Amino acid sequence: MRTVVRVTLTVLAFTVAALALPLTLGAVTLGASFENRYAQRTDGISPQPVRRAHDPAKPTAVVVVGNEGAVVSDTLVPYEILAATGAFNVYTVAPVARPVTLTGGLDLIPDLGFAELDKLLPAAPDVVVVPALPDLGEPTTRPVTDWLKRQSSRGAVLMSVCNGSGVLASAGLLDGRKATAHWLRIGGFDDEFPAVGWIRGTRYVDDGNIVTTAGILSGIDGALRIAERFAGTETARKTARAVGWPHYSPGSSPPMAQNTFEAADTVVGFNTAFRWDKPTLGVLLTSGIRELELAAVFDTYGQSLAVETTAVGLGGAPIRSRHGLTFAPRGTPMAGDFDRLIVPGADAAATHAADRYAGLSPVYLHAGPGFPFDAVLEDLARTTDTATTRWTARTLEYRTEHLALGGPAWPWTVAFRPIGLAVLGLLAAFGIRALYRRGPGPVSRTTR
């Protein structure tokens, strides 16, 4: 009996030794991976947005962000779609108009605070777009959810993007309604919000005055549906063509297979827990850049969880995007320690906007034609691996059959790291055990 207990304890001790290092270091890296998605700036800079003329003859659409930020594509993609129609006044709004950090480290200066919007409009905005927020269920979302309930009661059409449906559900606005969400979260929402009829396998659900969309780039389809309702099918069709979206389905949600977690998706675990030497990319912000081009860079690399991004600018000054948003970089390319300098935007590529930084070998991602996310996904595959890239595309809910995803099949170096740590732990355990078995050395005797 004592032998069985001794063997069991020995096996348990060596198992703990093998797991201790991978679990400890993995937990530290995992925590840092998710904390960095919304890392706030600390310099106190708060530039003012550029004010735009308001046309009272047009309906007004607003994209709401929280004081703690929002998911970058959920925010910028529907913004560009609605702005590109030319049929709306489009603004970003927040409880307070101060810089907020979108995922990937892109600092947005909201156009208006809630109080300023109330002064601008005699009634509720016609459309309110709700992205996923980082603090769902926390007290910090209360100003947003309370405001959403007021706008809904005043007649606004609400549209959520991705897990923005969780924000609507937490406000009670989806009770008794049909809705959808990102495939990674919809199962949890089933349990958390049982009064909602959650629907899978669709890019959007139009339930009257509330439209909800599935993951991330499904927000394009939802925004085109809003454009249809307010400006007509032909306007929506022209907008889809203008932004390069080939999947527009007039009057109905495009077909979509419901994603589920696959074995290859375990790559995200290695990226978040054991890729502690992630490359850092400086992303150069240039005036006139499309919002979709910005979203493509910050969300593709961000969703991969294999790369860190930091927004930098020419001279470090705030820039204005194609449709009037204001973004504040976190310094200049020469002031940062980056592995690569990424320059998004077709206009930046055409004008060689970063030629002054030729010594940093700037990468012009959008020098060729195509939807803005295509070039970024292909770059991610080349510089990391195809497993990470396919995970990222599935997270974005974007098809990749037309892309040339050339690169290593799997992050083997990263995948072997937990094994190496486990071996180190076992070697340490064997060393300690050997020392324990040897016991103290012989005691010398002194002869008088």
Image (spheres, helix red, strand yellow):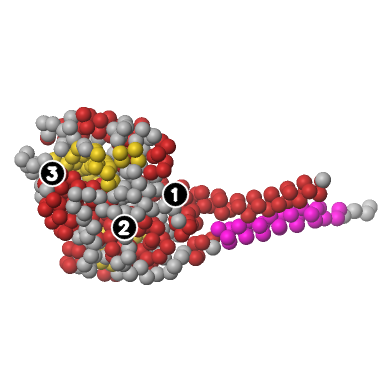
Give the residue number, with chain letter if any, for mark 1.
32
Question: Gap between marks 1 and 2, in whole Å?
Answer: 27 Å
Q: Is residue 366 above or below residue 144?
A: below
Q: Are marks 1 and 3 in contact (CB under 8 Å)?
A: no
Q: Are marks 2 and 3 in contact (CB under 8 Å)?
A: no
Question: Gap between marks 2 and 3, in whole Å?
Answer: 26 Å
The three-letter amino acid code for the residue at tag 2 is Tyr
Give the residue number, with chain letter if any, for mark 2.
398
Tell whether position 436 is magenta.
yes
Residue 34: tell me if it is visible.
yes
**Element at badge 1?**
helix
Residue 139 locus on image (x, y percent): 36, 31
Residue 230, disc: 3
Residue 323 locus on image (x, y percent): 15, 51
- Tell which residue pokes out farthest to the left in this image: 57
Query: In the image, what residue occupies the spot 73% across and 51% down?
Result: 10
Query: In the image, what residue occupies the spot 38% across and 53% down?
Result: 259
> Which one is earlier in the sequence, the residue at label 2 or at label 3?
3
Chain part drawn in magenta: 418-443
| Disc 2 residue crowd, few under 14, some 14–19, many 20+, Cα 10 Å | some
Query: In the image, what residue occupies the spot 50% across and 65% down?
Result: 413
Q: Is residue 401 above or below residue 448?
A: below
Which of labels 1 and 3 is toward the front?
A: 3
Quarter occupied by the N terminus:
top right
The three-letter amino acid code for the residue at tag 1 is Ala
Residue 441 locus on image (x, y percent): 82, 55
> Which one is earlier in the sequence, the residue at label 1 or at label 3?
1
